[in-house]
Amino acid sequence: MSDIWLSSLITNTPQEGFDLATKMSRVGVKVTQPSAEIRDKLRHDYAENADSLVAASQVIAINFQTVAAANNYWRP
Amino acid sequence: MSDIWLSSLITNTPQEGFDLATKMSRVGVKVTQPSAEIRDKLRHDYAENADSLVAASQVIAINFQTVAAANNYWRP
Amino acid sequence: MSDIWLSSLITNTPQEGFDLATKMSRVGVKVTQPSAEIRDKLRHDYAENADSLVAASQVIAINFQTVAAANNYWRP
Amino acid sequence: MSDIWLSSLITNTPQEGFDLATKMSRVGVKVTQPSAEIRDKLRHDYAENADSLVAASQVIAINFQTVAAANNYWRP
Amino acid sequence: MSDIWLSSLITNTPQEGFDLATKMSRVGVKVTQPSAEIRDKLRHDYAENADSLVAASQVIAINFQTVAAANNYWRP
Amino acid sequence: MSDIWLSSLITNTPQEGFDLATKMSRVGVKVTQPSAEIRDKLRHDYAENADSLVAASQVIAINFQTVAAANNYWRP
């Protein structure tokens, strides 16, 4: 994780913010399981389990709260 | 997910905000499982499991917090 | 869900706000499982499982955070 | 739940606020399972399961966030 | 729980705030299971289950949000 | 836990803030299971279970909310 992957929380649009929240959620997994090979293997089962998918959506929702606040909710 | 599906967090009413939060929760699932076919299959079992339904409601609640804050809670 | 069920987050008292949070939590279930018949059937098992009840209480707590903030916490 | 049990979120001390958060968490259970008899029965198993106890503590923590904000964190 | 254990949310340092959040999480367990003997027994199994430990860490994180906000994040 | 490990929530960049949130999540585990030996053993199984990894990512997301707020979201 020595690369710079999170230089700013500011995005141009809510949707880019949602994408960033998704990325943050995945990095949150990566810091516990650094092996891309193992993560790929796990993703397989994972992506076919409804409860797991909802859990993943929840982590994105939590990270999106942070990104949205950082961007003052992209208010016009 | 290249379509624009989240151009703004601003809605006219709380209820439209709740609908948006529901949509965000579903997209949060979609980014992990892009296949509509698999999602449809999973939804079947899912929608008949009480704990899963409550988990889904929780993700909507978290996303609604964000949407509501963006809209200053639609205060009169 | 075409009826208007959430026209405002403003309530007269904290307790009415808690009731609204309960309603929001239930609608969050309803959007995933629209059949009242299936929901009634599920509620039966559900309401006799302690972990499920605590999960339901958690969703209410999250929705109440939103309602309470909208009402400036009903401060005197 | 026709009694008035939540007339205010304001408390004199943080600890009274924590007690209120505990009460709110229990009412969140009660609205789904109104029978005191069934709740008592469930509590028995529940209170001897570590994961259940942590889940209960989490709901209290979420409700306490709301109560603490309402009280401006009881800042001196 | 008649002792005064939470007289203030204000702490000198973030780390003391984290310790307070840990204490709050434990009291959240204690209010549901008042018997120290049973809690000790449960802690044994609990502390050797990874998912349980992460769940405990989550409750601390939620309580720490409250304590940190109360202290204005100990900003210099 | 007598060492000073959390002297400030302020970091130079969002990414350093994310690293701090990760650290806080791990310390949240450590306070319940102080034995490094047992934690290492548990981490093994844990890191190969997708749901556990998502749960870990969620705790990081919650702690990151706190760190990001403390840093005013590193707004330029």
Image (tube, coloured by chain):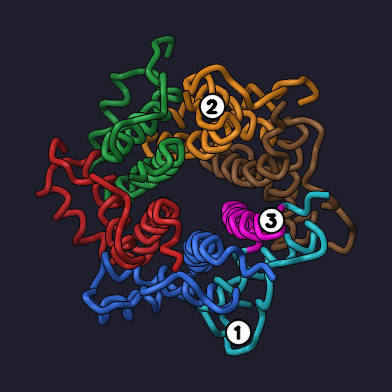
Chain colours: A green, B red, C blue, D cyan, E brown, F orange
Give the residue number, with chain letter if any, for mark 1.
D37
Chain of the residue that carries numbered disc 1 in the rendered image: D
Q: Main secondary structure of the magenta part?
A: helix
**Does residue E37 appear left or right of residue B27 in this picture?**
right
Query: Residues at badges 3 and 1 in contact (C-beta under 8 Å)?
Result: no
Magenta span includes D50: yes
Residue found 55% across the figure and 60% down from its top: C69
Q: Is residue E64 above or below residue B53?
A: above
The one of C29 and A44 positioned closer to us in this rendering = C29
Q: Is residue E67 above or below residue A34?
A: below
Q: Is residue C58 above or below residue E73?
A: below
Specify start and end residues of the magenta stretch as a single range: D47-72
Chain of the residue that carries numbered disc 2 in the rendered image: F
Foreground disc of the pair 1, 2? 2
Mark 2 is on which residue type? Thr
The image position of residue E63, as x and y in percent, is 65, 46
Mark 3 is on which residue type? Ala
